Amino acid sequence: MRSALLLLGLGCVLPAPAQTLKSSWSSQWQEQTANLQQGPLAQATRLAPALLQAAGLPRTDSSQASHELTLRHERSDLPGQSQLLIAATGRLTRQPASRTQPERWQARAQLQEAALSASHENWSWTAGRKVLSWDVGWGFRPNDMVQQERRRGLLPSTLRGQTLLMLEHFDADQAWSLVAVNPQRLGEAAGTPEPGQSLDREAALALRWYRRQGSQDVYTYARLGRSERASLGLAAQSVIGESLSLYGSLRWRQRHAAWESVLGEPTGLRWQPAWRQDALQALLGAQWTPEGSAHSWILEAWHDGTANGDADWQRWQGMLETLGGASGAQPPQRLAQLALQQLAPLQRGSGSLQRRNLLLRWSWQTGELREWQLSADLLHHPADGGHSLGLGLQWQGQRWQLGGAWRRLGGGQAALLAHMPQRGSLGLWAQADFL
């Protein structure tokens, strides 16, 4: 709470001539429906409900609420055409009750961005913490080599920038950017594997070259990281007429983090993070907005070579079947612990659960100023028939934004999405901009 009050006080002293201060307040509420029909959580619940309570995992539906204050300060009157950007966030989150702790509120203040930049003729540089996304695509962006955000979130989220040093050169048709990410960690040892997570603690050097050729944009990427080593990428986007946009992205990674299965006892298959060599990620997409229409369509197909393959998921399915038929052979608490260990490979963060994915999204804007937006999206896994269906409704005024979203996971007995610990989610959010 002290951090949140300090953030509020900072907003009272920052305004000055030739400076701008923007602030926003957002509130979010999310309700999740636990999957008690199939999957690791359902098996552990049937075997030993008390074990889940002791571990702090909800057996039934759970809800979470949060309130966030963001202050953004910009100053452009510094010598040498320099600019200063500072963005900080204070967040209050209500944590659901567990067996060991009652329901409680948690306060946290965080610096999202703090960067100093300057430009001279065709050159510019930036130093500090800054949000930097590079790739094309809506549901999947393999070439975001600096800022790897989680795509398709149910509710809006505030991104936290990366610590970087960036040098850029640009002209009318092309530009290139050279970025040293986390240079303060250059002397540290390689990090531990974090499957599906952005390596925010990894020191890396990233390069992007961009060129415009008529209605086409072409991007070339390269990255050298201390843990993930080398990456090479290519992306392109082409606008056809007034209504169609085609785009694609390709990335090769020398090393990536993944979940590896380890055999122990006869019924003791567990998962641990490990490094794997070589992975290819590819995306093809199209966005169609008919001229004069309020409707817009997005169709994307992608391959994510960093996800577990068919052999991995077959071992995972086999373990669940073994646990289902092992009742009485071992203590229920032991079987429940083994079931909970099978949740690990489902935690993919910013990565994909399956290697092959299809996404279809539709949105429709209406109102005098098109302030209302209705959207629907469907993610499909061809390998096992799993699907994720989402609906969203948003209203945007001059200062206020209101919205809601719903998502449901499903599929057959073999579908990974049908084994996720949450069957469905419902979220509401509101945001107000001030100053």
Image (cartoon, rainbow, N blue to C red):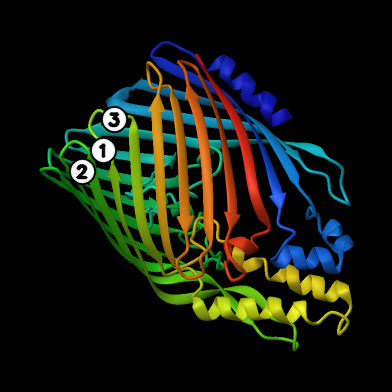
Q: Are marks 1 and 2 in contact (CB under 8 Å)?
A: yes
* Residue at image mark 2: 169
Q: Taking 95 as reference, is 292 above or below it?
A: above
Q: Secondary structure at mark 1?
A: strand
Cα distance between the residues tagged 2 and 3: 38 Å
Relative image position of residue 142 (x, y in whole percent)? 38, 58
Q: Which residue is mark 3?
A: 293
The residue under the point 79% across, 67% down is: 44
Give coordinates of residue 206: x percent, y percent. 33, 56
Q: Which residue has dot 1 on it?
A: 124
Looking at the image, the residue that sits furthest to the front is 412
Which residue type carries mark 3? Answer: Ser
Q: Residue furthest top?
A: 17
- Disc 1 to disc 2, how far (Cα)? 7 Å
> Relative to residue 328, is residue 258 drawn left or right?
left
- Is label 2 or label 3 in front? 3
Residue occupying image coordinates x 66% and y 54%: 423
| 400 over 297 or under it: above or below | above
**Which residue ends up furthest to the bottom in the rendered image?**
266
